[in-house]
Structure formats: C-alpha cells, structure tokens
Image: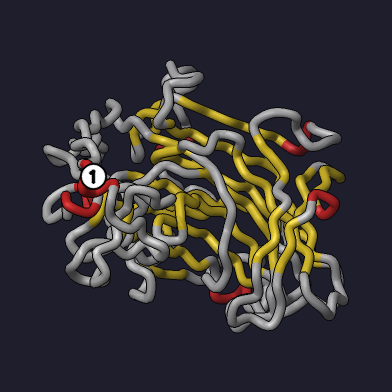
C-alpha cells in the first residue's frame, strides 16, 4: 500500500498467552557500535555496515537476513547476537483451533457468529481473547470518549502526487454512523482525509469486525487494518475507484522491497448500497479474512508478529493505488466496530 500509516491494537491469547523467553542483555561491545539509521543491521543479508538494532523503533533483534525487528523470525534461529538482542529459546506459539481452508466460492456464514460473552471471549475459529471493545455508532450522537481516538497525522508524498493529512474535522458521528470524510475537489497538497485508531496500542493478535458502507465517489482508499510497523501490517482495503474487484487483503512484506502477501475476491453485492461486516482475524502464523461471516481468504506469509494498533481510515494521495483525489466528498460510513483481542500488557485483562 503506497502510504505510511498510523495505527493501534491487540494481543490474542489463543487458549493461553505465549510466554516470551528472556532476551540476552545488550553487551558493552554492542553499546559501542553504530545504531542503525535504516533498520538494516549486522554483516549478512541486507546488513553490510555492522549497524546495531539497539535504538531501532521496530525492534532490538537483528535477524539472519540483516533486518531489525521483533518476534521469532528476528530474535530466533540465526539472530545476530553481536548486533542486537536474541532470545535464548524460541518463544512458544499459542495453540489455536484449526480453521477451514478458504473456499473458492462464497459459502455459508461461519459458526462463530455466536461469541461466548464475558471475559474471556471465546471465538471457535480464532481462540480466546482477554479484551473487547464494541462501539455501536447507531446508538451514538458523538464520537466516543474512550476506546477510540481521532488521528492528526501528516504523511509525505513520497512517490505519489500529493502529501496527506488526517484531521479530526473530517471525523463525525451522524445519521447512525461514524463518518470518515475525504473532502471533494482538493487540488493541492496536503490532501485531507480522516483516520481513527484504537486507544490500546499494544495489541498482539485479535478478531476485529467493521460494519461499513463504502462511498460511491471514486478516488479514495477505505482501510481497516492492524499496524505494528511498515513491516508488520495486515490490511483490508476497499478501493473506491473499482469496488467491483472486492476488498484487497494484504500482509505487508517483512523485508522492505520484497513482495507483499495479498489476495482479493469480488463481492456478491454493491458495497455502496448498504452496510456489511468486514472482518480480519490476526492469529499466530496466519491472517484470515471474512465478509458478512463468510471466509474470503487466508494468508500464511508475512504475518505480523509484533504488538501494535488497529486503524480505520479514508485517504487519497492521487497515486496509482487509490487514484483521486475525489471530485466530491467521499465518506466512509461505519455503523459498528467489534474487537476481541489480547494485549502485551495485562491492563484490563481477565
């Protein structure tokens, strides 16, 4: 996806929380090395300058391929201890129930529409979660004071025609829905859009459903996604320039410049004519995507493994992905957000 994103969200204790082994301490020699300016590290793979991950924002482990990060692929087998922290043993992965293989055609709704209420929340196809956030905008007249936050973010244009700006003025609750607006007829940078994030920003795995109606005005991207970093991200995106192709489901690449893992599936309905539930289950080793309770796809590569946030946005930068800017107001409407997740902290857990 051709944009940088701000986000927030969840940790899923699938059956039980994973126990992370202690990392080896940073040695004196490591502290004297040069911190990485670009998230490359070590002396193998992408790393050829001997940089360390001691100050990296994406994680303190240096992988065998020369990238800073966190999780088993960075901190486990092959981790370069001379250039970052490494785990003495591979962290165990929570046990999750098996999930059906995605069908090539839309089938019947999944059986877990009946979620066991109360703490913890048990979802048969996903696991057990210790946190929940449910916001029903049909019952609200103003933006909620807890659980969600509006974003104020500036994003550089990069290779796109326009830079972007998320501003709270484009976020509203009206007519029974949360409304994220990209105003029409914008012709110069920054192109204003709208974004909200979950207040909990240490989410590690979750099942998140967004009931939404797409805009009929072309030229923006509607996003519902998890974001830990540019290399740990899982997206549901609706491109209003061509909604007929259906949502795009993507795990962004762990290594910059590498291919992303992505799939899409055409919808059997007009996404602009009513509200439908778009769901992302982020689990250890896989992301699973649903529309109205029916599984659309599953990805098992480039799966995020670090804590982060959940984000909902509507944006345009005039680039090849989302096109635009829109010729008239483009409004993404969300009637409900339903989240079940786990966190790396114990705050609010069962």
On screen, residue 75 versus residue 196, left or right, reads left
Is residue 14 positioned above or below 157 on the image? Answer: above
The quadrant the C terminus occupies is top left
Q: Residues within 10 Å of mark 1 (few under 14, many from 20)?
A: many
On screen, residue 341 versus residue 244, left or right, reads left
Q: What residue is at 47 percent from the left and 69 percent from the top?
A: 265
Is residue 135 positioned above or below 243 on the image? Answer: above
In the picture, residue 164 is in which quadrant? bottom right
Q: Return the residue at label 1.
A: 85
Q: What residue is at 78 percent from the left and 65 percent from the top?
A: 192
In the picture, residue 245 is in which quadrant? bottom right
Query: Which secondary structure lies at badge 1?
Result: loop
**Viewer can see residue 95:** no
Is residue 342 positioned above or below 281 on the image? Answer: above
Nearer to the camera, 147 or 245: 147
Nearer to the camera, 85 or 290: 85
Residue 18, percent from left and from top: 26, 31
Residue 276, percent from left and from top: 62, 53
């Amino acid at each position: 996806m051709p944009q940088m994103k701000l986000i927030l969200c969840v940790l899923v204790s699938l059956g039980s929380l994973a126990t992370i082994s202690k990392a080896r301490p940073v040695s004196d020699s490591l502290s004297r090395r040069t911190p990485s300016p670009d998230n490359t590290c070590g002396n193998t793979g992408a790393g050829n300058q001997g940089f360390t991950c001691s100050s990296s924002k994406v994680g303190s482990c240096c992988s065998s391929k020369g990238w800073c990060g966190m999780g088993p692929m960075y901190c486990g087998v092959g981790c370069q201890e001379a250039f970052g922290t490494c785990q003495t043993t591979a962290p165990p992965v929570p046990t999750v129930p098996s999930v059906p293989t995605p069908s090539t055609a839309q089938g019947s709704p999944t059986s877990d529409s009946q979620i066991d209420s109360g703490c913890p929340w048990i979802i048969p196809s996903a696991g057990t979660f210790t946190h929940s956030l449910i916001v029903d905008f049909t019952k609200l007249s103003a933006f909620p004071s807890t659980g969600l936050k509006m974003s104020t973010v500036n994003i550089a244009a990069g290779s796109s025609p326009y830079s972007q700006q998320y501003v709270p003025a484009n976020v509203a609750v009206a007519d029974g829905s949360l409304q994220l607006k990209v105003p029409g007829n914008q012709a110069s940078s920054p192109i204003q859009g709208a974004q909200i994030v979950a207040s909990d920003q240490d989410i590690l795995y979750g099942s998140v459903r967004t009931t939404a109606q797409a805009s009929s005005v072309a030229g923006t991207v509607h996003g519902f996604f998890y974001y830990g970093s540019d290399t740990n991200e899982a997206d549901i995106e609706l491109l209003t320039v061509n909604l007929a192709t259906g949502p795009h489901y993507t795990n962004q690449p762990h290594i910059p410049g590498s291919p992303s893992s992505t799939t899409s599936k055409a919808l059997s309905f007009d996404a602009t004519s009513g509200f439908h539930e778009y769901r992302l289950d982020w689990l250890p080793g896989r992301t699973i995507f649903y529309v109205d309770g029916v599984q659309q796809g599953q990805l098992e590569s480039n799966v995020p493994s670090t804590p982060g946030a959940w984000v909902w946005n509507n944006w345009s930068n005039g680039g090849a992905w989302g096109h635009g800017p829109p010729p008239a107001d483009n409004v993404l409407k969300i009637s409900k957000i339903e989240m079940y997740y786990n966190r790396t902290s114990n705050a609010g857990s069962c």
